[in-house]
Image: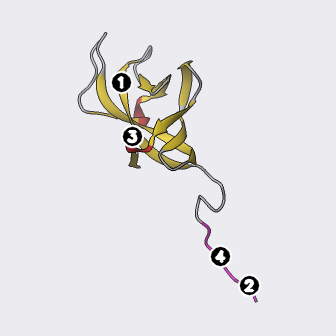
Amino acid sequence: MFRLYMLSCEELNLPTTKYVRCRVSLGLFGTELYVVVGDSSAFVDGSNVKVTKPPEQGKEVDGVVLAYVVKEEMERALIELPGQAVVGGLRTWVPKQLLASA
């Protein structure tokens, strides 16, 4: 007899995805955007970013970027951005109030 168990991402230690508030500007190529989250920044595919309005050359707009939540603590979360790091690494700690469900 077999039993089927459903495990959550947390139980399997798999990262979950959430949107994280960020600042967004144009990237180097047409489909990418430059995002700044905390102490990190990265070039990210535009499909992973939602913005309040499209950024213009040389200007930033508010937005959210889809990120992997690697670890959570009481008031902060370690996230990993889905792109190429520019400043810092792809992983950075952010306050939990910057997270939103994906």
Label 4 vs label 2, nearer the camera: 4
N-terminal of the two: label 1 or label 2?
A: 2
Label 3 vs label 1, nearer the camera: 3
Q: Residue visible at 56% across and 23% down?
A: 84
Label 2 vs label 3, nearer the camera: 3
Residue type (three-letter) at the residue carrying disc 3: Leu
- As helix, strand or loop, the secondary structure at mark 1 comes to strand
Label 4 sits on residue: 5
For this view, does 92 lie left or right of residue 2? Answer: left
Magenta stretch in the rendered image: 1-7
Q: CA distance from mark 4 to mark 3?
A: 33 Å
Visible residue check, residue 48 = yes
N-terminal of the two: label 4 or label 1?
A: 4
Specify the label residue 24 is tagged with.
1
N-terminal of the two: label 3 or label 1?
A: 1
Residue type (three-letter) at the residue carrying disc 2: Phe
Label 2 sits on residue: 2
Magenta segment main secondary structure: loop
Where's residue 41, x and y in %? 49, 22
N-terminal of the two: label 4 or label 3?
A: 4
Q: CA distance from mark 3 to mark 1?
A: 15 Å
Q: CA distance from mark 2 to mark 3?
A: 42 Å
Out of 50 and 78, give the one closest to the viewer.
Answer: 78
Q: Residue visible at 26% across and 25% down?
A: 54
Image vertical order of residue 75 relative to residue 3, above or below: above
Label 4 vs label 3, nearer the camera: 3
Out of 46 and 74, give the one closest to the viewer.
Answer: 74
Indicate yes or no whether the magenta region holds residue 4. Answer: yes
- As helix, strand or loop, the secondary structure at mark 4 comes to loop
Label 3 sits on residue: 98
